[in-house]
Image: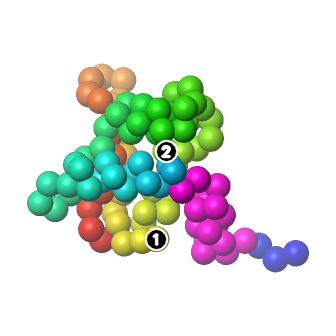
Amino acid sequence: MKPITPQEVIEHKIKEIPDEVIDVWNKIIVEKWRESAAIVYKDEITKRIANTLNIDVNKVYDFGYLDIKVIYKNFGWNVEYYKPYFDESFRPYFTFIKA
């Protein structure tokens, strides 16, 4: 058996996430696009995915539907995730910038 390649990991991640979830991500990126970046708040995308799939919000986390960084990076995006440290207070969010 040979080790998995980075491309195979990306292809596996893409297959794990349903098209409906990618569609929700795509729509919110377009909606939130401002000049050179899109900021997508974690709570907002989580609710949209849960509503679209008619699942509990916690299932969005369980199924890894927010783990899209490597997928979008493979398609030409720089994706970063920001969350507050223990001494900070802000809504966690993703940024999408053209690579």
Q: Is residue 21 left or right of residue 37?
A: right
Q: Amino acid at mark 2?
A: Leu
Looking at the picture, does residue 17 appear above or below residue 6? above
Residue 32 appears in the picture as rendered: yes
Q: Residue furthest left?
A: 35
* Within-10-Å neighbours for mark 2: few <14, some 14–19, many 20+: some
The Cα atoms of the two marked residues, 2 and 1, are separated by 16 Å
Rendered location of residue 43, percent (x, y): 37, 31
Which residue is pictured at 35% across the width and 34% down the height?
44
Q: Secondary structure at mark 1?
A: helix
Question: Which picture quadrant has residue 34?
Answer: bottom left
In the picture, which quadrant includes the C terminus? bottom left
Percent coordinates x, y for residue 52 in the rendering:
48, 38
Q: Residue at x 62, y 35 (%)?
A: 62
The three-letter amino acid code for the residue at tag 1 is: Asn
**The quadrant where residue 37 appears:** bottom left
- Residue that carries the numbered disc 1 in the rendered image: 74
Badge 2 is on which residue?
A: 66
